[in-house]
Image: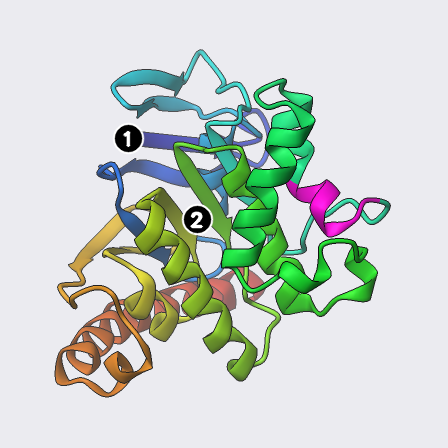
Amino acid sequence: MNVTKIYDPDGANVLALDDCCMEIQAGEFCVMVGPSGCGKTTLLNAIAGFHDITSGEIHLDGELLCSGTRMADPGADRIVVFQQGALFPWYTVLENATYGPLVQGKMAKAEARKAAEELLGDMGLKGILHNYPSEISSGMRRRVEIARAMMNDPKVLLMDEPYRAMDALTKTVMHKHLLDVYDATHKTIFFITHDLEEAIFLGSRVYVMTTRPGRIKKVIDVDIPRPRDFRVLSSERYLSLKGEAIEAVHEEAKRAFEAGERELA
C-alpha cells in the first residue's frame, strides 16, 4: 500500500499521511507504533472502509481495495476490534459470537452455535456462554470480541489499541490468548499500539511511523521464534529489539512534542 491522506483539503489542509508505503505479507502479525496523531488509526480506518484516502492505493490479496478515487467497502474480510469495545449488550456471549455468520447467511444457526461454542471454549470462555457482556470482566469481553471477529473468518484482523485500558496483569493474559489464536490460525493481523513491549512481544514485524505527516520511518523484523511466552520478555534478543524500537519512537515523540509546543506558541 502507498497512502496519502489530507483532512479538510479546502480548509485546514492537514496532511495526516504522506506516501505511507508498506507491504504486509499474508499471515503476518504486523504491529504499527508511533506518536499520537501520526496517522496510525487513519490508515487502519482506510483499510476498514471507514473513510477515503486522498491518493495512493491499498490492495488486499492483489486486488484493489481503495484508491484516491475509490473508497473501500466495509466487509467481513476485514474485521475491526475497537479500542472501546463493540459487543451488543442485549445479546449473550454466544449470541454475540454467532451474530456475524448468521446475519451474512454463511452458517445455519446450529452450525454457527457449534463453531462458536468450540472457539469460545478454546479461548477459556466455555463457562460464560449465556452471560451478557455487563456480567463479565473487561478481559473476557475483549476475548469475546476477538472470537466474534474470528467467527467471520476474516482475511485481516484489524486491532486498534485493543488492550490500552487494561492493567499490566490483565494485558499479559490477553497477550497469551491472542498469540494462541494467531498460532492456531495464522490470520493476518494489523495491530496498532503505543506499548513498545507489547509490539515486540506480539509482532512479526514492527512498523515505526514518523510524527505527522505519517510515513514509515523504520521496519523492525522481530526474529524471536514462535510460539512465544512470558520468558521471551527477559531474553537478550527481545531487550535488543525493544531498545531499537524505543530509540526510533523516542526521536519521533520528541519531534511531535516540539511541533506541539510551536503550535501553542
Above or below 93: residue 80: above
Report the amino acid beneath label 1: Asn
Q: Amino acid at mark 2?
A: Lys
Identify the magenta region: 91-97
Residue 63 lies, with reference to residue 45, above or below; the image says: above
Q: Which quarter of the rendering shows the C terminus?
A: bottom right
Q: How is the image coloured?
A: rainbow
Image coordinates of residue 149 in percent, x first then y, are 55, 41
Secondary structure character of the magenta stretch overall: helix
Report if residue 31 is visible in the image: no
Q: Quadrant of the N terminus?
A: top left
Q: Which residue is mark 1?
A: 2
User: Quick one: label 1, few (<14), some, or many (20+) residues within 10 Å?
Assistant: some
Q: Which residue is mark 2?
A: 40
Give the Cα distance between marks 1 and 2: 14 Å
Give the left or right position of residue 189, taking residue 125 as reference.
left
Helix, strand or loop at mark 1: strand
